[in-house]
Image: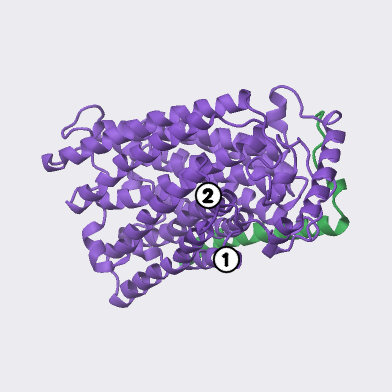
Chain colours: A green, B purple
């Protein structure tokens, strides 16, 4: 691609770590709610 | 935000920095050429544009389905389509409008404007941003294709209640897969928005300095992450009931069809706020700009938004008073629903107070915002009427409900989206739109939307049930009026498409501040118009 979009290099190490951590946490919350509602409907 | 307004020196320095940075990057690093730009882009502005164009296409597709419904209801008797196809149209119209038009439009606005409003160079997860968009396109391609499956498309209403929905033909797994994909897309988009706002704000921009549109989207994104998996869980259970012999919702196997309704509405009510909170944010941006005043009660607006989001989780059973529930349950859901009027009232009063003694002008974004204020409030009030459990027994499943939620969603959410498009389009394209045509579009839309939906209150109160292709002759007159309004409103939107096209092609040059040269409110007005492909390579300073 000819364009220069924001890359990981533009972020500080702290920002990258926080972004990774928040993303994983939120994805796990979503997955937990999905599984939780199905499991609670079985019980 | 308030500090940005009161420090013009900060504004000018920010503007200068941004402009220099933008020019420096423009020559070397423009967008890719051809189709690959759109397929592989990770630029928030490109992705925002794609979301907005996609939602416009979906508005037209879903609108056409609504016109099929209104054409059939123009007169009593069966005229144009068979009942099964009529039900398919009401079902797919709703799914397309909710998940394919309104939500993607607000996501598109978020993609475009949140990085510009918080001084970020892009979204925090640009590749996931691209993936979210194309996943949504796949989802709606599947949903539209499900119309052509043997047995027809899904026809049980957008709520997909069992056991009726389990009678759907081959379209059922396709529709459920489409909903899963759209949900995954929404969740990824929400994670991106939260991560961006929490990590990439410009130095000095604390949470309580963020523009209201960004605030409402932050809260909306949390709502989405909390409830989209619930809907995904509900439709997964429908799928296993249909294909794998489970009986989650089948009384014959020890399950309970009412369980589905509880799960659906635990998702469905916050979903209403997912569509309306960004609209609140848009109106909170536009009214101060065209009143030449700061927003009245900024902090109260933020807390009211958070309160509405919280309350949206504890009111779901007001959608199902008639299934039968203990009196204590009815009382709880009735009173908690009425409580929502308090923070919503705070918002309406604050918008009104913002205009008080302001130097008001009435350009098209302001006209749409004002129409929102009046007409959304009508939808809110009819919602309060339905919150009263004993009264709801009469309104339930009548056209009164149809009138209520269309007032909330069309002159509510859709008018706010149109206001946002007119408000920010000069920033996107670098051109002013045709104000005369835009005002014509506003007046046609505002008149026809009332001709379309207001008579539905009368029909509902007179007892006309929703989701039927034929009706008693006593309902004929108002149905004819409503259908005329529907076609008028639908045709008016072709003007909207033309105005957008014309503005994208050219027109009077827009300045950086666009609307409020003397006192622009927000970082997006510090970058040139059109906003450069890359903005804020150097973080702007917010004091």
Q: Which residue is mark 2?
A: B360
Q: Which residue is mark 1?
A: B297
Q: Nearer the viewer, residue B249 or B161?
A: B161
Which quadrant is the N terminus of chain B positioned in?
bottom right
Q: Residue at x 78, y 42 (%)?
A: B535
Which quadrant is the C terminus of chain B positioned in?
bottom right
The percent position of residue B456, horizontal first and vertical second, equals 26, 46
> Is residue B232 something that shows in the picture?
no
Q: Nearer the viewer, residue B402 or B507?
A: B507
Secondary structure of residue under mark 2: loop
Q: Residue at x 46, y 51 (%)?
A: B235
Q: Residue at x 44, y 53 (%)?
A: B373
User: Relative to B432, is B184 above or below?
Assistant: below
Q: Earlier in the sequence, mark 1 or mark 2?
A: 1
Q: Chain of mark 2?
A: B
The percent position of residue B157, horizontal first and vertical second, equals 35, 45
**Same chain, labels 1 and 2:** yes
């Amino acid at each position: 691609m000819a364009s220069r979009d924001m890359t990981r290099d533009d972020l500080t190490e702290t920002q990258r770590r926080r972004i990774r951590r928040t993303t994983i946490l939120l994805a796990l919350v979503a997955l937990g709610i999905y599984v939780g509602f199905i499991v609670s409907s079985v019980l | 935000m308030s500090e940005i307004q009161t420090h013009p020196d900060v504004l000018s320095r920010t503007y200068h920095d941004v402009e220099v940075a933008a020019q420096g990057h423009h020559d070397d690093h423009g967008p890719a050429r051809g189709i690959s730009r759109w397929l592989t882009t990770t630029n928030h502005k490109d992705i925002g544009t794609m979301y907005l164009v996609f939602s416009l296409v979906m508005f037209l597709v879903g609108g056409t389905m609504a016109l099929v419904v209104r054409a059939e209801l123009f007169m009593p008797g069966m005229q144009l389509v068979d009942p099964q196809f009529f039900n398919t149209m009401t079902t797919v119209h709703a799914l397309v409008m909710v998940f394919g038009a309104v939500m993607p439009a607000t996501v598109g606005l978020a993609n475009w404007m949140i990085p510009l409003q918080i001084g970020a160079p892009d979204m925090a997860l640009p590749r996931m941003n691209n993936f979210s968009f194309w996943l949504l396109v796949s989802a709606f391609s599947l949903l539209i294709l499900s119309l052509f499956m043997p047995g027809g498309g899904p026809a049980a209403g957008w709520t997909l209640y069992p056991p009726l929905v389990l009678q759907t033909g081959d379209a059922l797994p396709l529709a459920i897969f489409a909903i899963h994909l759209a949900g995954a897309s929404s969740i990824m988009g929400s994670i991106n928005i939260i991560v961006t706002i929490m990590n990439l704000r410009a130095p000095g921009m604390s949470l309580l300095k963020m523009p209201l549109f960004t605030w409402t989207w932050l809260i909306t994104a949390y709502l989405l992450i909390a409830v989209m998996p619930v809907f995904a869980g509900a439709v997964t259970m429908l799928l296993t009931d249909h294909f794998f012999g489970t009986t989650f919702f089948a009384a014959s196997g020890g399950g309970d069809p009412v369980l589905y309704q509880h799960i659906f509405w635990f998702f469905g009510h916050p979903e209403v706020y997912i569509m309306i909170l960004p609209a609140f944010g848009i109106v909170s941006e536009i009214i101060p700009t065209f009143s030449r005043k700061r927003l009245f009660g900024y902090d109260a607006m933020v807390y009211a938004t958070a309160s509405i989001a919280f309350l949206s989780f504890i009111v779901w059973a007001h959608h199902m008073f008639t299934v039968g529930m203990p009196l204590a349950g009815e009382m709880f859901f009735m009173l908690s629903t009425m409580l929502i009027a308090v923070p919503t009232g705070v918002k309406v009063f604050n918008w009104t107070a913002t205009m008080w003694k302001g130097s008001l002008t009435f350009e098209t974004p302001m006209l749409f915002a004002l129409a929102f204020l009046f007409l959304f409030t009508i939808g809110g009030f009819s919602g309060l009427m339905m919150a009263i459990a004993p009264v709801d027994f009469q309104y339930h499943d009548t056209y009164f409900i149809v009138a209520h939620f269309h007032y909330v969603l069309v002159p509510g959410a859709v008018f706010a989206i149109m206001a946002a498009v007119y408000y920010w389009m000069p920033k996107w394209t670098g051109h002013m739109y045709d104000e005369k045509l835009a005002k014509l579009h506003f007046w046609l839309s505002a008149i026809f939307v009332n001709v379309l939906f207001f008579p539905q209150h009368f029909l509902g109160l007179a007892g006309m049930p929703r989701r039927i292709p034929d009706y008693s002759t006593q309902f004929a007159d108002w149905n004819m009026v409503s259908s005329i309004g529907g076609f008028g409103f639908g045709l008016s939107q072709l003007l909207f498409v033309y105005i957008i096209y014309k503005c994208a092609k050219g027109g009077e040059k827009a300045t950086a501040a666009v609307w409020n040269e003397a006192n622009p409110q927000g970082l997006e007005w510090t970058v040139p118009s059109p906003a450069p492909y890359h903005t804020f390579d150097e973080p702007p300073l917010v004091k």
